[in-house]
Amino acid sequence: MKFLFFTVLLLLYVGHCMSANILAFLPTFARSHYGGFQPLLKELAVRGHNVTVLSHFPLKNPPPNYHHIDVSIKERQDNNFSMLSIAPYLKPLIIPIGTLFFASQFTLETLNNIKVKEFIHSDGYQFDVVIFENFQHECFVSMSHKFGAHAIQLFPATPTAFPSQWYSQPFNPSYIPDPNSGYKDHMTLFERTINFLVTCLQFFLFPIFYMPKQNEIMLKHFNYTGSESRPSLEEMMKNISLTLINTHFTLGTPRPLVPSFIEVAGMHLKPSSKLPKDLQELMDNSPDGVVYFSFGSVVKGSHLPMYQVEMFLRQLSQIKQKVLWKWESDNLPELPPNVVVRKWFPQVDILGHPNCVLFITHGGIHSVEEAVYYGVPMLAISIFGDQLYNSIMMESRGAAIRLKYTELTEKRFGYSLQEILSNTSYKENAIKLCKIFHDQPIKPLDKAVYWIEYVIRHNGAHHLKTAGNKLNWFQFLSIDVMFVLIITIFFFFLFSFYAIKFIYKFVTEFRKYNIETDDDKKDN
């Protein structure tokens, strides 16, 4: 009995020694970015770590050692703004240029929150690890310096070329499409040209125009005690221990990853639960299946122009399936009998029901993950950002039909709707992707926890970084090597030119001399 008692005490002591104080600095108000990582933060607390989360979104029924610092504010004034209004202007070459000059405004708006400011300048906290989201928020890495902690960053979607360069993460534009391009990995010559230009814009212009703005924000907002001795922003970015990416090769382009880049898509996914009684009965009693229609949390269905709403309803009324449409407004259009609208649906549990035959989606990364996880084909009406990339990748795998919102017509929507519901290959390919996604040696959530604890066990795990992490961009791209080769070839040809010219002159003069000598002999 005493042995058992001391064993339990020993295990508790070891568990306490292994636990870490972890800060998750997530002050942005994008729920779609936060939702995929929230299960990770909860799981870290469940496994004995002391987790402090600064965010807008409190956790229901948190573990005892999960501490939430609420920085939520009143509803933002731009609530009626819709991405649909600017979708026509979001072209592959426009997005990186726009990011250069406007992306930092998102960071500024986040840091102007008085609650966030108070925490940045607070004292009394001690953390071993700082986790932050990097979606044009490079300056957030300063929190790791403030607390002398290891830095771990979260990417809510596939990273672009610009953040990849800090870690020497390969980003070959010949086969790795920029997520904002809307191209798949098998590109035409024209698409590879545009993708190459987009990549070059990020490599060459972002350090010149974008990073100084992030540095300026860092100096203004992260002026905590001790910030005077802080390294440069570029140095701190290169010192990040681990990067968790919300993607998987099933969802996007297979690509090489440096050891510190870990794919963890699907951490929030689990077997579906039983639906509320009315929805459960509706789906159970729909022999032809159910179509689920949602544009996610960023784009609201109620922001659609009325002529498009009427167009959708006309085409949806012509199918035999029931339709569940997430509609956020109280102003309901006249609905056909097979369409049910609500402000909220339990999306994961609907997609997990065996009678869900189609997901009409905007192609956001979480929606695509959920559709793949449950093997549901998609009609993806992509609007902006990585939605274009996510959607075309699913189309290239045969599990979706992609329609660009800017090119949407009733004829195209109607044809695509009928095609995907009548052609069984889309369902078969969706199930195939589902099996591939599930066939992982370790669950995404367990993988993410393992690597965070690996960083803790190995004092930052800086051995995961490649030597390329110490190179600047022209060394990383071997531009200095190409310059040396070009100069060498130039001087080689220059030397060869003068050597040949000298030899030619020598030979010519020698022959002339011999001719003159022969003529003199003949004269004599």
Image (cartoon, grey):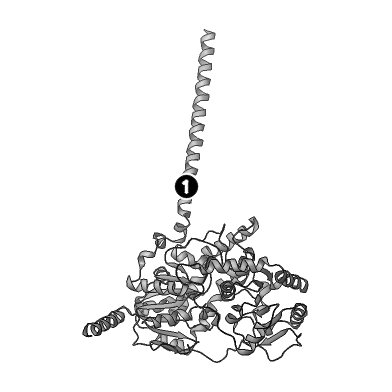
Does residue 397 lie above or below 355 as drawn? above
On the image, the x and y values in percent for residue 472 come to 44, 61
Three-letter amino acid code at disc 1? Leu
Pick the front one: 75 or 442 = 442
Q: Which quadrant, please, contains the N terminus?
A: bottom left
Residue pushed farthest front? 1
Q: In this view, does 1 lie to the left or right of 524?
A: left
The answer to which quarter of the image holds residue 252 is: bottom right
Left/right of residue 389 with respect to residue 459 in the rendered view = right
Residue 394 coordinates in the image, percent (x, y): 62, 67
Which residue is nearer to you in this view: 140 or 501? 140
* Residue 326 in view of the camera: no
Task: Please give the count of numbered marks on the rendered protein.
Answer: 1
SS for dot 1: helix
Disc 1 target residue:
485
Q: Which residue is drawn at 43% across and 69% down?
A: 234
Front residue of this view, candidates 379 and 288: 288
Query: In x, y percent, where is residue 423?
Result: 71, 67
The single residue placed furthest to the left in the displayed view is 2
Residue at 50%, 32% (x, y): give it: 500
Q: Which residue is drawn at 44% across and 82% down?
A: 42
The crowd level at tag 1 (other Cα within 10 Å; few <14, some 14-19, many 20+) is: few
Q: Is residue 276 above or below residue 392?
A: below
Image coordinates for residue 490, horizontal then vertical, percent: 50, 43
